[in-house]
Image (cartoon, rainbow, N blue to C red):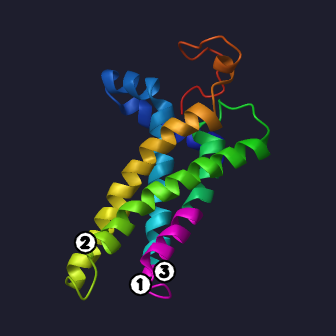
Amino acid sequence: MRRSGVLRIANAVLARLPEPLHALALKHRELLKFAVVGGTAFLVDNTVFYGLKLTVLEPKPVTAKIIAVLVATIVSYVLNREWSFRTRGGRERRHEAALFFLVSGVGLVLSSAPLWISRYVFRLETPDVSLVTQEIADFMSAQVIGTLIAMVFRFWALRKWVFPDEQAQSGSVRLAPTADSRDEAA
């Protein structure tokens, strides 16, 4: 789908929102876009994680999680660069990508740590617990707790270091979107 098609869909959704929600969505559009990208990366992460964990990496769930996060991170970089933070930045792409993957590396540790603690500190794995308990613990620790911790860190770090506001870097502060903003509706 072309960018204009995405903008039409976004405008159609925004037009149907009641006024208080419409204004709130416009005010926090960057956060909402980040959340959509995060949801997409979450689906990629889950698909790869469970695809590996239930097949070739069954005895190595942490390795499966790390691979899943790496794949989801690549998807996340492309979508964040081209959509969520497209009005920010100004860095050379190599520098920006290196910072993104550094921040994501920290996010990888943050998202994998709860699973590691669940499995190897609390011993929530078979035969110490039932298979159902193990799977619930894996999902809660890796896909819920780890993802939430990493998400909060990534949003803060991406805005601060990877995709900083160009005008804020030069000393001026942008209080509201300007009329000539490249990101009018979505």
Q: Residue at x 22, y 84 (%)?
A: 128
Cα separation, mark 2 vs mark 1, equals 14 Å
Q: Residue 64: x percent and y percent? A: 49, 75
Q: Residue 156: x percent and y percent? A: 49, 36
- In the image, the segment drawn in magenta is 52-71
Q: Secondary structure at mark 2?
A: helix
| Residue type pointed to by label 3 | Leu
Cα separation, mark 3 vs mark 2, equals 17 Å
Whether residue 152 is situated above or below residue 66 in the rendered picture = above
Q: Main secondary structure of the magenta part?
A: helix
Cα separation, mark 1 vs mark 3, equals 6 Å
Does 51 sit left or right of 18 as displayed? Answer: right
Q: Residue 103: x percent and y percent? A: 58, 47
Q: Which residue is mark 1?
A: 54
Does 111 sit left or right of 168 as displayed? Answer: left
Q: Residue at x 24, y 84 (%)?
A: 131
Q: Which residue is mark 2?
A: 136
Does 169 sit left or right of 35 as displayed? Answer: right
Crowd class of label 2 (few under 14; some 14 to 19; many from 20; radius 10 Å): few
Q: Which residue is mark 3?
A: 52
